[in-house]
Image: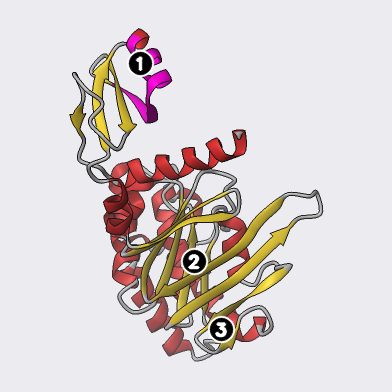
Amino acid sequence: MQLRISNLSKTYPNGVQALKDVSLTINNGLFGLLGPNGAGKSSLMRTIATLQDADTGSIFLDELDVLNNKDEVRKSLGYLPQEFGVYPNVSAEELLNHVALLKGVADNKQRKELVNALLAQTNLFDVRKKKLGGFSGGMKQRFGIAQALIGSPKIIIVDEPTAGLDPTERNRFLNLLSEISEQVIVILSTHIVDDVRELCSQMAIINKGEVMFHGHPQDAINMVQGKVFRLLTDKNEAKQIAKDFKVISTKFNTGKIELHVLNDTHPGNGFEVADAGLEDVYFTVINRMLEMEIQ
């Protein structure tokens, strides 16, 4: 299974260009779409999910024309948006049964077996009788995945799924996505770098509607490996360093300011070579675009 996106562009009526000539190839497995808020991730997801039209470009799921065969695409699609509603006074079992019926699973026995299997897969079987209004954020997200899996989809889209989840629920949810992606395409749209670093074998970084990087996370890291340097310093020295070097990120670390600097050669005393990670790539790419806009 392969999803091919070619030269996709979208401008909204208010003049905001959400997508600018986006081209991506996505194979079976977990694909991470990484970018800041407002980068165009949700616009791309909604277009793939047939919820909005593109101005130009094409999307193909194998030989299926996604933009011109929306009803057919929806039979192969599971979608978990960033915000989705549930009926608070209905149990997980009841609502999942209803959704399965709406998706065409008419046989009662088959539908019951499917519902039970999905509740077990998403670790919700023991709370299947509980009303959805009493579910935690992580439980609701897992219920959303259970809904998305009805109909044996070939592609599943999840938009910012771990935002607001505690560490335990986040790990449980990401492990579930990883398990599912062994058989289908799972597109994980997020602004959380760790979500992509830990799970995805393919990824893209998008900002202001443009694809800034597309490939394997390790290939992205290799681009900056040996060029990222780390320094723990105070506020005053940090200001001076920012004038002399390209600082890609800053954060507080044990009462000090930790700077990561991108430089072709060693910056000098006090700096040490950092073990570059995907976060360094992310900030390098995003900062590069900001610099281009300023110029």
Disc 3 crowd rating (10 Å Cα; few below 14, some 14-19, many 20+) is some
* Residue 183 location (% of width, % of height): 33, 79
Q: Residue furthest top?
A: 236
Residue of label 1: 238
Residue 153 seen in this snapshot: no
Q: Residue at x 22, y 22 (%)?
A: 268
Q: Earlier in the sequence, mark 1 or mark 3?
A: 3
Disc 1 crowd rating (10 Å Cα; few below 14, some 14-19, many 20+) is some
Look at the image and tell me in which quarter the N terminus lies.
bottom left
Disc 2 to disc 1: CB gap under 8 Å: no
Considering the numbered disc 1 on the image, is that residue within a helix, a strand or a loop? Answer: helix
From which residue to which does the magenta span run? 237-252
Q: Earlier in the sequence, mark 2 or mark 1?
A: 2
Is 242 included in the stretch rendered in magenta? yes
Q: 188 or 231, which is in the foreground?
A: 231
Q: 175 or 6, which is in the foreground?
A: 6
Q: Residue at x 34, y 42 (%)?
A: 279
Is 24 included in the stretch rendered in magenta? no
Disc 2 crowd rating (10 Å Cα; few below 14, some 14-19, many 20+) is many
* Residue 25 location (% of width, % of height): 46, 73
199, above or below 51, in the image: above
Residue of label 3: 75
Of circles 2 and 1, the one toward us is: 1
Q: Amino acid at mark 2?
A: Ile
Mark 2 and mark 1: Cα distance apart in space: 41 Å
Residue of label 2: 157
Considering the numbered disc 2 on the image, is that residue within a helix, a strand or a loop? Answer: strand
